[in-house]
Image (tube, rainbow, N blue to C red):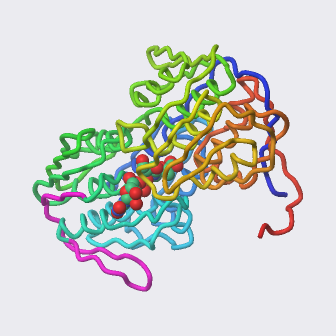
Amino acid sequence: MEPLYRVQGGGPLHGDVRISGAKNAALPCLAASLLTTEPCTIENLPAIADVDLFLEILRQLGAEVDHDAANHRVTVQAVGPLAEAPPDRLVANQRASFLVMGPLLAREGRGGCAAPGGDIIGQRPLDVHLRGFRSLGADVRTEAGRFVASGQLRGSRIVLDYPSVLGTENLLLAAVLAEGETVIVNAAAEPEVVALASLLSAMGARIHGAGSHTITVYGVASLHGATTRLIPDRIETGTFAIAAAITGGDVRLVDARPRDLDALLFKLQEIGVEVEEGDGSLRVRRRGAMQATTVQAVPFPGLATDLQALVTTLLTQAEGVSVVNERVFENRLGYVGELRKMGARIVTAGATAIVQGPSPLHGAVVQGLDVRASAALVVAALAADGETELLDIFHLERGYECFGEKLRGLGAAIDRVGVEPATPRL
Ligand code: EPU
């Protein structure tokens, strides 16, 4: 049976929803557990397919994984010896799996990984990671289709061409055990980088400046085990905030961290959505009409590219012409064609979407193209007249914990159903 989401659009969302731990903090923290032979425990771990896949990669590398999914906790112990590279088949499904390179290289003096897969949202090169490893003294080459890095790491000054999130994380993971001082210039400042640095520091690493664009690492000889609690997922928070706004609802997001979402919350208020920040919570309510605006998806602290499809979807219901510029990935507007099937009036030019609103949305059969685009289509379906079916929900389930259940708790009519597989889509 092929699973899909069936959504009956209509009513406003109401009530409380708990935000899960951040997917994009979970993955680098899991990678960090490879840097020590002692146990590392991660709490508030989201129950999502991307985490399961990363845990399988850790097992395949030789780590012991004690996963208590019901209690959102995992303990990883990588006593060793570790395999040189994760299986290519697993890596092909997840971009973040490349994060094992840094720890393997730092700990074993040699690490390998195939070119990783993941969402098709742009070319997603790896030059930031590979150049960085070279700056740290590694020899980097390809062997049998895999990247292999080897050598004794020495601290150095690394200037990134682009503040890549995974690139910064991979270099941090390598530099903590390098000899001497490393300075990463033009580093990514995303909260997930800070979350990784804070776990590494708890393990005994010496890191300054995480959260700024210059991070300094003083290498240490070894790291020990530690426990960390993941930060709330800011993209899941933004997703529910937008779902509340598009349905004209009133929702309290519990266990959230509003300061990680400044750019979105500012935009929501600008277009006419009420936002009330609490201590670890956020209330989002819309009573009146929304006004069109302009939006740029850029690195943190600007509006996140992972919220771009969701914001564009919301703007289909705002009065006037909105312009959305995607400035991180060159190919992240593919979902626009699916939104059009639901009645949205959007044209694209390169990485820019021009949205004419408000346009009444109606149900349709639509296809999820990546994790965030899939969430955006569900959000559109909540505001649409009639029934929508979302196909390829494996994308969505990579990154959202109990998405349907959480929305049902807010009053949405959404079901995960299995249907006979259709004939192949051409
Ligand atoms: N880039 C390079 N060279 C590199 C790496 C990246 O030019 O070596 C470019 C990319 O082509 C892109 C830009 O840098 O244009 C940003 O890419 P970045 O490397 O920052 O993205 P990422 O680290 O691969 C993470 C998140 C993504 C999120 C981006 C941007 C994880 C596991 N993934 O990806 O999250 O969109 O940062 O914030 O942390 C998602 O959760 O749905 C997701 C795709």
* Farthest bottom residue in view: 144
Q: Which residues are magenta?
A: 138-160
101 in magenta? no
Q: Is 338 placed left or right of 77 in the picture?
A: right
Q: Residue at x 29, y 43 (%)?
A: 197
Nearer-the-camera pick, 288 or 234: 288
| Image quadrant occupied by the C terminus | bottom right
Q: Residue at x 52, y 23 (%)?
A: 271
Q: Position of residue 58 (x, y in %)?
A: 47, 60
Q: Position of residue 156 (x, y in %)?
A: 13, 60
Quadrant assignment, res 178: bottom left
Q: Is 157 placed left or right of 192 in the picture?
A: left
Nearer-the-camera pick, 82 or 180: 180
Q: Position of residue 182 (x, y in %)?
A: 15, 55
The mark total stands at 0
Q: Residue at x 76, y 28 (%)?
A: 412
Q: Is 57 placed left or right of 383 in the picture?
A: left
Q: Is residue 249 above or below residue 352?
A: above
Q: Position of residue 86 (x, y in %)?
A: 47, 69
* Farthest left residue in view: 180
Q: Is residue 24 above or below residue 288?
A: below
Nearer-the-camera pick, 192 or 31: 192
Q: Is residue 413 above or below residue 136?
A: above
Q: Is 21 placed left or right of 418 in the picture?
A: left
Q: Residue at x 77, y 34 (%)?
A: 384
Question: Which of the four quarters of the rendered structure image does ligand 1 lie in?
Answer: bottom left
**Residue 111 in sight here:** yes
| Image quadrant occupied by the N terminus | bottom right
**Residue 30 in sight here:** no
Quadrant assignment, res 78: bottom left
